[in-house]
Amino acid sequence: MAENRLKLNPDKTEFIVFGKQSDKSELSKFFPVNLLGSDLSPAEKVRNLGVIFDSEFSFSDHISSLKKSCLYHMRDLSRIRRHLSTSMATTLANALVSSRLDYCNSLFYAFREHQYKKLQNIQNILCRIVARLPRRSHVTSKLKTLHWLPVKYRVMFKVNLLTYKALNKGYPSYLECYLNPYTCAANTRRSNPSQKFLAVFPFRRRVFKSRRHFDVSFAHSAPYLWNKLPLDVRTAPTLATFRNRLKTHLFYLAYPP
């Protein structure tokens, strides 16, 4: 900080320790730490670029904050909905609520089903407001009419989009090392470069402490989801074409005929 002529403010500095309660208890003897005359202890949750991380990496605080924010805007939208056309209400819904559900949602790939359900309930309420449906009515057909992917498929969309950008655009550069073409000693269909299959990293106990942590990591999830895409999606020539083909594919999976 001093070399770059920056001043560190201890009052605005915080840090967090991730891990199990037993692991954090073993480290408690090292805290608080002294920083420029101020004693600092680990925080239970911190905000980084708008995402709330808790010490157990459960994202429960982020889900609560996201839900509260979305409900606030949905209440305002519901008050003026009768004065808006459907297209205008859809535009406002996407700008005020759907954009919040989509923000950094590639992190949500690690969510469990009950967490996805909480976020899906937000989208369902938003759909009822836009379509002016009764409170407890089914929304699947209306979601399909609005061409809205369910939350879980929107997460898959974002992970695949990051994969395409890393493969074809070179960014984010720190993800490229996890995306390697599939190779095999024998000449197989999967090893054909024109098929654009990716190698899936094997599970290694020294790197990942559990199978679940491995399954939700980008090193595994990105090649896994990518290899399940149809060939015409994987070989899309431009980003715009890839987005259109990917959404069409996921839309078919979410709402099968």
Image (tube, grey):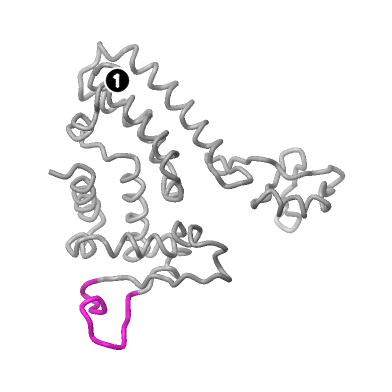
Q: Quadrant of the N terminus?
A: bottom right
Q: Magenta includes 37?
A: no
Q: Principal SS element in the magenta part? A: loop
Q: Residue at x 34, y 12 (%)?
A: 79
**Residue at the extreme bottom of the image, as rendered:** 185
- Spot occupied by residue 199 in the image (x, y as percentages of width and height): 36, 73
- Spot occupied by residue 189 in the image (x, y as percentages of width and height): 20, 78
**Magenta span:** 181-195
- Spot occupied by residue 43 in the image (x, y as percentages of width and height): 70, 41
Q: Residue at x 58, y 71 (%)?
A: 206
**Residue at the extreme left of the image, as rendered:** 257
> Relative to 161, is 89 above or below?
above
Q: From the viewer's perspective, tell me whether residue 221 is left or right of residue 196.
A: right
Q: Quadrant of residue 38?
A: top right
**Crowd band around label 1 with a 10 angstrom C-alpha radius: few (<14), some (14–19), many (20+):** few
Q: Secondary structure at mark 1?
A: loop
Q: Which residue is mark 1?
A: 136
Q: Quadrant of the C terminus?
A: top left
Q: From the viewer's perspective, tell me whether residue 224 is left or right of residue 10.
A: left
What amino acid type is highlighted by mark number 1? Answer: Arg
Q: From the viewer's perspective, tell me whether residue 84 is left or right of residue 59.
A: left
> Relative to 58, is 143 above or below?
above
Q: How many marks?
A: 1
Q: From the viewer's perspective, tell me whether residue 197 is left or right of residue 210.
A: left
Q: Residue at x 51, y 58 (%)?
A: 213
